[in-house]
Image (cartoon, coloured by chain):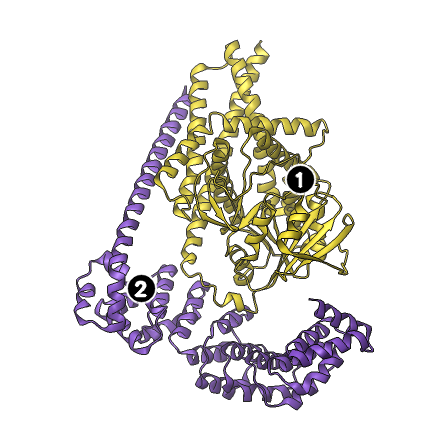
Amino acid sequence: MIIIYWIVVFTLTVSACFAIVFVMLMARKIRHNRLEKRNREYIENVYPLVSSYITDAEQFRHRIFSMARPWQKKLLVGILMDISSKVSSGEERERIAEVCRLMGVPEQLRRQFGHRQWWKVGEAIRQAGVLRLTELMPEVKAHLSSPVYDVWATAARTISLMGRNDALIDYLLDHYAVLRRERLIRMTDILRALTDEDIARIEARMDSAPPVLKGLFIDACAQSRSISAIPMLERLLDSEDREIRARALKSIAEIGFATRHDKVLELARSDSWVERMHSVRLIRSCSMERGIPLLVELLGDREWWVRYRAAESLTHFGEVGRSRLMWAREHHPDAFARDMAAQILAG
Amino acid sequence: MLVLKYFYAFFDEFILFYVIVVNGFYLTLFFLSLAEIRKYMRSHLFREDVELVSSELTPPVTIIVPAYNEAVTIRESVLSLTQLHYPEYEIIIVNDGSTDETLEVLKREFHLVRVNQIIRQQIRTKPIRQMYRSRIFSNILVVDKENGGKADALNAGINVSTYPYFCGVDADSLLEKDSLLNAMRPFIEGENELVACGGIVRIANGCTVRNGKVVDVGLPRNLIAAHQVIEYLRSFLMGRIGMSRMNSLLIISGAFGIFRKRDIIAIGGYNTETIGEDMELVVRLQKHLYESKQEAKVLFVPDPVCWTEAPQTLRVLQRQRMRWATGLIESLALHKSTIFNPKYGAMGLLSMPYFLLVETLGPVIELFGTVFFLTGLFLGFVNVQFAVFFAFATLVFGVFLSLTAVLLEEISFRRYTKVKDFVKLVLLSFLENFWYRQVNAFWKTWSVIRYVRRRKMSWGHMERKGLTRQT
């Protein structure tokens, strides 16, 4: 009997839980769909108005922001974040920041920075970054040392978005000894749109940076495609570290401009195949016609990747390159070179 | 008679104990999954791909697609793979001796040309006849080989691959654009070393697919496919996330899973003798990790999505389920030394016993339990009141468990947005406990009997309807 009693209790409890869960989910679903519809309609009506205010500063639109209810303010922040990700003019950004101040967004975010729940902190940092609220920079910087991956990564991204790569560069150089390799790489990945000042800053402290950070900064310069990094990168071609030389070659190739042609041609004969390969890429990207005979020679390199890149690079030189490939296909003394030329011409 | 009476008394206690333990375990899995999904959804807010697609930490991946008689779906499937948002990857389609027009479709759709490539046979496979490269997609390679089964095809793909990670994808599956990036994210961002990562598989039946992309999500009209939606939700959102949280995940779906190549080569690749090669591989991999005392993990991530076509007839479903059940039994039998063995940690003490006692023997106990109950009722050995209440309690809890899968879906990705789809899912949660579960239990029991009687199981034939129509 007692077992039956407990089975009945169990059944009723589970049934009650089932009913509660079902009602809760149904109510949540209906509510969610209704709110989505409401929000969608509000955004459809308000988005053009906000957009025109940001781009044209029509003063009378002010009341959209000052008279918004809490749920509307939340949507407005979302709209501003969306617009902020698309505009590029300083004036428009300033207007977005002004609107945010009018709605009390910086104060709200400051309160959120101290929240116990890391996802709320992270969301606040993200909003600060997208909205370019530079007055929150000190608070954001403090979170670079957070143990939570999503928080420090968002903080690094925000700092970069705010145009303060210098703060991130300084942080990396000052803390590299205590940061894990993966963290160094991720933070450097986040460095975007390096300015001339950032590159000068990197160059000034490059000698004191460890090899891993040097290599990462070199890659960051390549990503930014900044011509002002070329002098520093070309100086690194004389480095004793082979890895640094290879990275410098790769970065210069990605930027597509070089002045030390002789050094590049010298490195194209290096005993390291990686250096030879990157030199070949550089010859191609800088359209270094002096390098064409060397490319023909490298069709017979012992390393497949060097041969492939050499053949591919020759096609970049138009009819001149093509005619050299055709010659190589028939007459190159090396069989692998003839084969590679044939493959590239067939493709 | 007295003996029978005592037997039934013992049986009652055993069943009660068994049901309490099993349902307690399911509840635990549910709460673990709930916590894990909530944690995952929070970090979902900060998802940024910009750096990952150009990061040094983002490794290149080989996608291996074993294909046997997949002429109907291969084009859509490969097209979806060419649109992935990932910096560097190659697609190797292994035509495993298809007897239909799979190779012809590939040649026509992807402008294949023959290539000669030297392959390092790190894992022994059936001979390769020819290799092809695509002229329009430079990262597509097709390997045409003699038929050797899915495991053999995957091994051939591993031999040919040039990258340190590979992702096995079924030829009838569609990957979402960010699936590969999301599945590789734990490898790129993780604090812990990972050797394998699985993603969620969802049912494409009922969805609108265009040019290799799922553009609208819906529930299938076919009842059998619709039941599988709940089943997949329960299995992936509850089962695998919960197991992954306990670091005892033993199965990564063959439809979508990423592995670190060097570890798979170290353990000899996929086992071609078993029909459940996906589970057997992960069990062997976990075993290898424990034996070599490595800290590396096998993880499940709920976000990366792979859409697949589910069987719509009982005949095809039966073949599939019996194949899975046989594969599970074979994996357990091959690695029986790990069961209840503390040397293998959570795997030996939790997941292997779970798969043995619940997934394998559970349906047998359920089916024979039902027969014993009915016999006992007829002979008067079973308390009618107890039987009724117990059956009702089991039913209610079964429905509740199915509903928890819907709950987990609602608090996470909410792919089924319409209210009518939600109501349909709840009704399916009810309905499956009246016939679908019992039919599956019967097939699983039959598989156990066949295995014990040493009858071989084959892949059979999966009827493909194609993914471009709403079904």
Q: Which chain is yellow?
A: B
Please tell me the numbered disc located at residue B59. Answer: none
Rendered image: mark on residue B331: 1
Between B59 and A137, the residue placed more toward the observer is B59
Sort mark 2 into few (<14), some (14-19) or many (20+) by Cα contacts within 10 Å.
some
Give the camera-side residue of B416 and A142.
Answer: B416
Residue A331: x %, y % from top left: 81, 77
Chain A shade in the render? purple
Badges 1 and 2, same chain: no
> What kind of residue is marked 2?
Gln
Could you tell me which secondary element the residue under label 2 belongs to? helix
Neighbor class of circle 1 (other Cα within 10 Å; few <14, some 14-19, many 20+) is many
Picture quadrant where residue B180 is located? bottom right
Image position of B174 with respect to A21: above or below: below
The answer to which image quadrant residue A43 occupies is: bottom left
In the displayed structure, A109 sits above or below B256; it is: below
Image point 57% across, 37% down: which residue? B354
Rendered-image quadrant of the N terminus of chain A: top left
Q: Is residue A282 visible?
A: yes
The subunit carrying tag 1 is B
Q: Which residue is mark 2?
A: A112
Three-letter code, disc 1: Ser
